[in-house]
Image: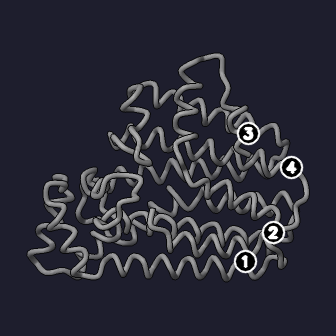
Amino acid sequence: MDALILRRLQSDVVLINQIGHYIVNSGGKRLRPLSLLLSARACGYTGAQHIDLAAVIEFIHTSTLLHDDVVDNSKLRRNRETANVVWGNDASVLVGDFLYSRAFEMMVEVGSMRVMDILSHATNRIAEGEVLQLLNTRDPDTDESRYMEVITRKTATLFEAGIQLGAVLAESPPEIENAAKEYGLCLGVAFQLIDDALDYSVANNALDKNVGDDLDEGKPTLPIIRAMAVGTSAQRTLLRNAIEHGGRDQIEAVTEAIVSTDAITYTAALAQSYATRAKTATRAMPDSAATDALAMLADFAVSRTH
């Protein structure tokens, strides 16, 4: 899959090669394409098109990262300068567009209307999630329901589509395909919940971004939403102000409020509940090493420290 990604990144436009290779080789976990590869094998697929679709999933994900970093004015990702810092916003957006269009080229080559339907719907849902997140930015009245809607669309949708595609390639019966979708959705939600909890983990030195980035960008994620819901009046005032105006200069006080209200524990527990649902869904799949690996992947999503 990695070899295919590098091959399909090639363009006679030098800047596309430079930025594409920079972000694809920047140390990502590859969980989305990995879970698709495992799903296909777990569902009994013996062909090779799962490799093509795994690359498609990674290109779509990489494109969203390039666009996200521009929208968020991010400076750091995976402990490296973001592409928009190195090459500028214009180049990052346009190369992100190239990766999207290359993904759809590869999708068409698979020759399945079902595959195209699933992936086109997924990319549309992801875009909706991005807009919903934008609407929540700097809004301290964002509640848990609105937050969950964002991460379901923005993050979990691509996991769900990838896992479902593995089952589709294997021509699995509806009950297995539905189980694959459930696994992917729950894995994606659990993964994002832990990501958002880690953003306030001051003791963690292995983060892909600076501690407090979400707060600085005005994103009300679950740890801060929960702390506001159960905290004292003074804590709510502090957290509302931090969301509205950016709170990196208050990160210690904000983190203390989040920790003292057990908001990180609450977020982690919710993530664990989704991981458990994901593991339960694998029971509908045939017993195999790939199925066992999917269950292990769900455990990793909530036990990781980066």
**Disc 3 to disc 1, how far (Cα)?**
29 Å
For image coordinates 56% across by 65% down, the residue present is 188
**What amino acid does circle 4 point to?**
Ala
Instruction: From the image, tell me which residue sits under label 1.
Output: 282
**What amino acid does circle 1 point to?**
Thr
Mark 2 is surrounded, within 10 Å at the Cα level, by few (under 14), some (14 to 19) or many (20 or more) other residues, namely many
3 vs 1, front mark: 3
Quarter-of-image position of residue 68: top left
Of residues 44 and 6, the one drawn nearer to the viewer in this rendering: 6
- Going from N to C along the chain, the mark reached first, 2 or 3, is 3
Instruction: From the image, tell me which residue sits under label 3.
Output: 3
Residue 39 as seen in the image, left or right of residue 44? left
Instruction: From the image, tell me which residue sits under label 2.
Output: 42
2 vs 3, front mark: 3
Q: Do the residues labelled 2 and 3 touch (CB within 8 Å)?
A: no
Q: What element carries label 4?
A: loop
Colouring chosen for the image of the structure? one colour
Name the disc covering residue 13, or none: none
For image coordinates 38% across by 65% down, the residue present is 198
Instruction: From the image, tell me which residue sits under label 4.
Output: 48
Q: Do the residues labelled 4 and 2 touch (CB within 8 Å)?
A: no
Q: In which quarter of the image is the C terminus?
A: bottom left
Q: What element carries label 1?
A: helix
Of residues 72 and 145, the one drawn nearer to the viewer in this rendering: 72
Mark 3 is surrounded, within 10 Å at the Cα level, by few (under 14), some (14 to 19) or many (20 or more) other residues, namely few
**What amino acid does circle 3 point to?**
Ala
**Disc 4 to disc 1, how far (Cα)?**
22 Å
